[in-house]
Amino acid sequence: MYVSAAFDRLYPEGAGFPEPSKRNDSGWLDGDATGAGITVVADLFPRASYGAPFDPAIFPQNTPWTGTLWPLYTDLAVKTASSALLVAIDDALTYGPVVYTGPGHDRAVLYETYRPNDRAVAQLAAPEHVNGAHAFNFLNDADYLFFASVGSFNYGHFLVDDLPRLKAVELLRASNGGRRIVIVMISHGPAIDRIRTDAIRRIAGTMLEIRLLPQSETFRFERLLYATPVSSHPVEKNPLALDYVVQAAKAAMGIDQTPRSKLLVLRKSSTVRALVNQKELVDRLVPLGFEPLHTDDLSFEDQVRRFAGAAIIVGQMGAAMTNTMFAPAAAKLVYLAPAGWIEPFYWDLSLARRQSYRAVYGPVTQQGRPVHDSDFAVSLDAVLAAID
C-alpha cells in the first residue's frame, strides 16, 4: 500500500500527481496520512510555474536529430512544479531512500519516496526487513531529518533534488527551541559522501549532525522528519527551491562578483561518453580566453565560486555541468552531448534558473553501447557559433 505525505496539499485536485489512473486503485494511496502517523510541520516551497516558449535557436546545428527534439521540447517548455512540505512521520522505517510509514506491521510506502521515476533505481525492502528486526532504532531524542533521494549518489542530482531541502533546517532552527538536528543520509561511497557533507555544512553550518546509513538495511525512527521532493526527474524543478539554495550558498560564501571568466568544463579520463576531439576543442577555445576546468578534485565551495563567476560555460552533459545552476542568468551555457541521447534535464534546469541554453550534439563514435554512454565528437564550428 502507498500513502502520500499530504495528497491534497501536494496535488491539489490531482494536479501534478504522476499516476492519476491509479489514484483510486486498491493499494494506491488508500491510507490516510494522519492515520499513518504523518503530520505537516511547515511549508517549504509553494507550487511554481516556469518556462518559456520553445526556441529552435537552442540548437546551433539544424540536424535531423535536433529536429526530432522539437515536438518534445515544445510540449515541455512551460510547466508547473509541485509544492514542497516538511512533514513528521511517527514510527517510520527507512530502507535506502524509501520511507515506510507506521504504525507497527501495517506499514505503507511513502509515495513521495517511490514515484514512477524513482522506481528504476529504488528498491523496496523485503517483507522480513520491514516486519523483522531493524539495524538500529532511533529514539525521539533529536530532530532527525531524512535527506535522501534515489539520485543522491550523483553529485548533479544531489544539487537539484536534495540540497534545496536544506530550507527545512532553517525552519527547524527557528521553531524547535534549540533541539538537536541530525541529517540522515544514505552512504554512497567516500568521494560523494565527502562532497555532500561538505555542501551541507557549507550552507547550513557546522552546528548540526550528519549520520550516514548503509543502503541495504532498515532503520526505525520514533519520529522522522521528511521534506517532500522539489523536483521530478528529468523535467520538473521547483524554481523557488533552486533560487533558495543558490542564494543560500552564495550568501554563506560571501559571493557577490561580476561574472567574467570563460570555463571549458572537462571530464577526467572518462570511461563513458568521452569527447574524442576534446584536445581539438581545447586548442580552439583556450586562445579565446577559455580556462579548462576539471571539477573532480574541487571542493563544493570552489565549484560554486567558479561557476558563479563565469560569463560563458561550455561542457559535456554530466554531473559537473549541473553546477551551472550557480551561474548568473546572463551567462551563456553550452552543453555538449552525443546525438540520439534524449536528455532534457539541463534544458529544464536552465528554464528553472532563467538562463541561456545551447546544446551541440555530435555523432557517436562507438557501436553497441547505449547512446548516453557512447563516445562522441562535436563540430568545433558549431561550438563557436553557440558561444558567439
Image (spheres, grey):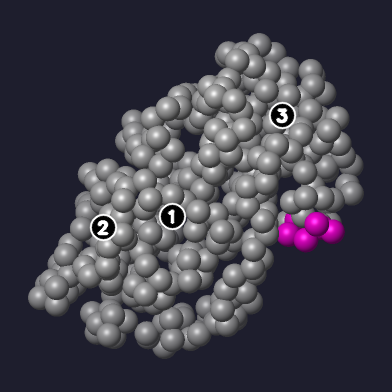
Kindly indicate the quadrant of the structure image that contains residue 361: bottom left
Q: Are marks 3 and 2 in contact (CB under 8 Å)?
A: no
Q: Secondary structure at mark 1?
A: helix
Residue 310's tag is: none
**Residue under numbered circle 2:** 306
Most extreme residue toward the top is: 133
Apparent side of residue 299 relative to residue 156 in the rendered image (left or right): left
Observer-side mark, 1 or 2, equals 1
Q: Is residue 101 magenta?
A: no
Indicate the quadrant where residue 193 lies. Answer: top left
Residue 99 seen anywhere in this rendered image of the structure:
yes
C-alpha distance separating marks 1 and 2: 15 Å
Residue under numbered circle 3: 89
Quadrant where the N terminus is found in the figure: top right
* Residue located beneath label 1 in the image: 247
- Left or right: 29, with 384 as reference point: right
Vertical comparison of 355 with 122: above or below: below
- How far separated are the C-alphas under marks 3 and 2? 39 Å
User: Crowding at label 3, few (<14), some or many (≥20) Cα neighbours within 10 Å?
Assistant: many
Left or right placement of residue 335 versus residue 275 in this view: right
**Tag 1: Cα neighbours inside 10 Å, few (<14), some, or many (≥20)?**
some
Amino acid under label 3? Ile
Which of label 1 and label 3 is nearer to you? 1
Q: Position of residue 66 (x, y in %)?
A: 46, 81
Q: How many marks?
A: 3
Instruction: Tell which circle, 1 or 2, labels the residue nearer the N-terminal end.
Output: 1
Residue drawn at x 62%, y 74% is 78
- Range covered by the magenta-colored residues: 12-17
Front in this rendered view, residue 366 or 256: 256
Distance from disc 1 to disc 3, alpha carbons, whole Å, reads 29 Å
- Amino acid type, callout 1: Gln
